[in-house]
């Protein structure tokens, strides 16, 4: 297997990151069409711009994985300072992964683990004791996260009213 390198996002990565977003939205909208936008709509609505603003505003990073000179995926990292959280919640400063994608053709090659390791290292460097992420019901990545030590803290439930 070729060497995987992890680096920060640059504007030259835009097209391939949008391809990653498209693949993720394809899967998510197929699993839960009432909740997730179509991939076309996510790109039309400039999801990447939204993600970059979120990362910058939260002292986070967008990390990109390259293999053989080709971008294979990315992970977005945000740092939540907890100042607006409930006084009942003990975890105040938490790293959050709002987005994490490895292109289908590069999955199951260890790239996701390397991206997640890099994200966790950055989060630790920001003095966060915990990292959190969301995974939708039915996403095969659920088992991947569990294998890497993630565990469920809560379940978010929704009910359609209209």
Image (spheres, rainbow, N blue to C red):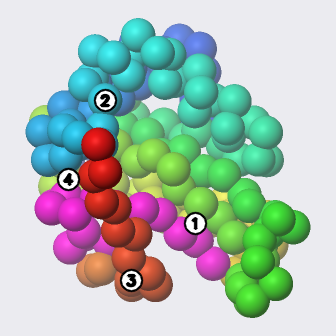
Quadrant position of residue 158:
bottom left
Q: Residue furthest right?
A: 83
Q: Is 160 covered by the magenta stretch?
A: no
- In the image, 28 versus 108, the foreground residue is 28
Mark found first going from the N terminus, 1 or 2: 2
Residue with the mark numbered 2: 37
Q: CA distance from mark 1 to mark 4?
A: 19 Å
Above-or-below relation of 88 to 40? below
Which span of residues is magenta-colored? 130-145
Nearest to N terminus: mark 1 or mark 3: 1
Residue position for label 3 = 152
Q: Look at mark 1 in the image and give the residue it sits on.
A: 120
Point out the frontmost of discs 1 and 2. Answer: 2
Q: Could you tell which of marks 1 and 4 lies nearer the N-terminus?
A: 4
Question: Does any portion of residue 16 appear in the rendered image?
Answer: no
Numbered disc 3: secondary structure: loop
Q: Residues within 10 Å of mark 4 (few under 14, many from 20)?
A: few
Residue linked to disc 4? 109
């Amino acid at each position: 297997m070729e060497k995987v390198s992890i680096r920060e996002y640059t504007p030259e990565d835009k097209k391939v990151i949008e391809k990653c977003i498209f693949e993720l939205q394809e899967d998510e909208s197929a699993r839960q069409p009432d909740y997730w936008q179509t991939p076309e709509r996510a790109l039309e609505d400039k999801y990447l711009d939204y993600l970059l603003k979120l990362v910058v505003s939260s002292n986070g990073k967008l990390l990109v994985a390259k293999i053989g000179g080709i971008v294979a995926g990315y992970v977005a990292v945000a740092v939540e300072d907890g100042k607006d959280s409930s006084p009942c919640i003990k975890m105040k400063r938490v790293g959050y992964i709002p987005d994490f994608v490895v292109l289908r053709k590069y999955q199951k090659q260890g790239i996701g683990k390397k991206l997640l390791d890099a994200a966790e290292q950055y989060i630790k460097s920001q003095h966060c004791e915990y990292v959190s992420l969301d995974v939708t019901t039915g996403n095969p990545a659920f088992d991947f996260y569990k294998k890497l030590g993630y565990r469920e803290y809560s379940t978010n439930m929704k009910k359609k009213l209209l």
